[in-house]
Amino acid sequence: MVFAAIKALIRSPAVHFALLGWIVFAVVGVDPVAPSAAGIRSAISLRRVELVYEQIARERGRPLTAEEELAAIEIILDREALFLYSREIGLDREPVVQRRLSQIATFVAENPEETMTESTRVSEAVELGLIESDSITRRILVDGARRLIRATALVRAPNEESMQRYLSENPDDYQVPARTRITHVALNRNLRGEETWGAADEMLERLVAESLSAEEGAALGDETVVEAILPAMTDRALERRFGPSFVRTLAGLPAGSWQGPIRSPLGDHLVFVHERIPQRLGRLEEVRERVSSAIRNQVADLVLEARVAELRGQYDLRIGERDES
């Protein structure tokens, strides 16, 4: 498999829970460490981890399981690694981060009306530790680091062999749905009122008695918003035009002859089923972009996981002792 070599490099991850992500950003804090100081231990206080547990428990209305606590710790450590890396590579100098730091420095300043340059406000925010404690700034930096790491894989297109193999191994994701091709003669209820159903029965008798073809019959119907001769369409597409009840009835009609009448919000219909095309696996040329995107995103996820694990070791991240903050 195309991912085998990458998977071999990656440790088995703890189970991640999507709900934990935003809570981690909002609650957890870390003891500051110089962002370029690889190899220096960086400790996240146990008390702050407990604050995350407490907030998640409030959201769920129950205590966390041991597995959920481990998942929360994994997310905390992963995101801290990405935060430190973002500062190491200078993402904290990006304009969006600088503007945010300037804003929060102004907000907490003793004299907000005092005239200061943005760069001075930013320096003040950094000195106050706001870059570590502000959840929005952290989110911007972590997301930026994540996107940069994943981009290394996203820009590389998989080859034909890899895409064909992936398609074969994931057939359920790339099914071309079944389609039905019909012609219908519509009798518009807005025009005919209560006489519509009776007129439909009479129309069916004429179509059968005169052995009219689909094309000939199509010319006999009332004008509606749906054209009489339709291409092969999925059930969902037909439902949008005629409603679900029409499509359920249509499924039981034989092909090759006039049938009906079938009622829809438009009126009553005589239907000629030309063919039913069964569901099938899409050919690579039909689903190439989707397959390519899926492969690149899977590889990008694996690259991100491997890089975060490497960064966690590089920064020697750990859960520290309890503090009183």
Image (spheres, rainbow, N blue to C red):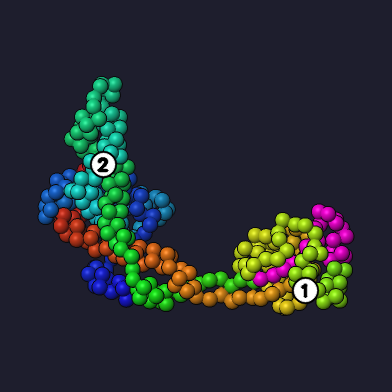
Horizontal placement of 163 versus 209: left or right? Answer: left
Name the image quarter holding residue 316. bottom left
Position above or below: 130 against 18 = above
Quadrant the C terminus occupies:
top left
Look at the image and tell me whether residue 268 can be seen.
Answer: no
Question: Percent from the top left, x then y, of residue 261?
Answer: 79, 68
Q: Quadrant of residue 133?
A: top left
Q: Which residues are magenta?
A: 181-201
Left or right: 281, with 157 as reference point? right
Left or right, 32 with reference to 161: left
- Which circle's residue, 2 or 1, is located before the other in the chain? 2
Which residue is nearer to you in this view: 297 or 213?
213
Q: Residue at x 83, y 72 (%)?
A: 207
Q: Residue at x 23, y 41 (%)?
A: 93
Kind of residue indicated by mark 2:
Glu
Instruction: Classify mark 2: helix, strand or loop.
Output: loop
Is residue 180 found left or right of 306 in the rendered image?
A: right
Residue mark closest to the camera, 2 vs 1: 1
Q: Main secondary structure of the magenta part?
A: helix
Residue 76 part of the magenta segment: no
Query: Nearest the camera: 192 or 206?
Result: 206
Residue holding disc 2: 94
> How many neighbours does mark 2 have within 10 angstroms: few (below 14), some (14-19), or many (20 or more)?
few
How far apart marks 2 and 1 lie (CA) works out to: 68 Å
At x 26%, y 51%, the residue is: 145
Tag shown at residue 249: none
Q: Quadrant of residue 257?
A: bottom right
Residue 187 within the magenta-colored segment of the rendering: yes
Name the residue carrying label 1: 213
